[in-house]
Image (cartoon, rainbow, N blue to C red):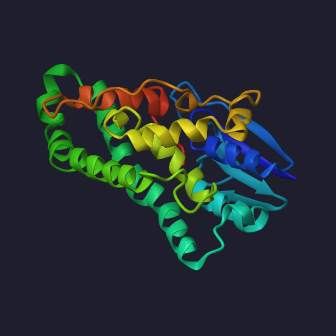
Amino acid sequence: MLTLHYLQESRAHRILWMLEELELDYAVELHERGPDGLAPPSIKALHPVGKAPLLQDGARVLAESGHIAAYLADTYGPQLIPADEQARLDYRYWLHFAEGSLAPPLIATYLFSIVEARTPKLLRPIVLFAPRMLQANYYDHTIADMLGFVDAHLDGREFFVGEALSTADIMMSFPLEAARARVADYPNIERWVAAIQARPAYQRALAKPGARYSLGQQRTPRAAPSPRATLVERASALVDMLTGRRTETAR
């Protein structure tokens, strides 16, 4: 029996979706965030890093959503792995792009906003000098470049690789849902997100008792922020959707 250790408002939800796509027999153990927004001790009791999601398969305890997704595909879901050799290369690229390239600048934007929110206004010019420089000179254009690249790739495509859903789509769901504050300028991303969220398995995952994932709710995309916006203005919409202003993201 597979057991998914599920932390609300986290990457655990894409694993729940994947389990529904595969129609596997599994159980869900819910873990509530503490008052500080962090994962509870019950997660660390299962894995030393204390991050969600975790997947138990017999005596195995697997961590990291990318590792879990690849394991599920390799072990239980060959239909989520392209058969063609070139398609498999593309599949592995997007599988790793999701967390290796796209997620880090989004998370950095989120963390900078937490620093700003917790810094007294009088100290912000000093404390936030470096974060604002990084945001303006690196993260803003990096995020825009990556979203532009993804949007161009999705032009005329229903899925990231081939003609059917793959684990690459499941892995790309979290960062693209988290980036929806910016997707007013990226119609192919918005179309793709709307399509995956309409899938029956995705909706079944959302309906699971105790499941909570605000990124999975359909919404109207907001306009991209002005280049002159402050750090909070640039990040606030993303932060609201990413973790509901919690102080940690779960891997």
Q: Nearer the viewer, residue 248 or 14?
A: 14
Q: Nearer the viewer, residue 175 or 58?
A: 175
Q: Residue at x 63, y 40 (%)?
A: 13
Q: In this rendering, is residue 124 above or below 133?
A: above
Asked which quadrant contains residue 122, the reply is top left
Residue 164 horizontal/vertical position (percent): 64, 57
Residue 246 horizontal/vertical position (percent): 47, 29
Considering every residue shown, the one lying at the far bottom of the view is: 85
Left or right: residue 76 versus residue 134 is: right
Q: In this rendering, is residue 86 above or below 144?
A: below
Q: Residue at x 78, y 40 (%)?
A: 28
Considering every residue shown, the one lying at the far front of the view is: 156
Q: Nearer the viewer, residue 2 or 173?
A: 173
Left or right: residue 108 versus residue 9 is: left
Q: Residue at x 23, y 44 (%)?
A: 140
Q: Nearer the viewer, residue 79 or 69?
A: 79
Q: In this rendering, is residue 51 above or below 167?
A: above
Left or right: residue 153 versus residue 122 is: right
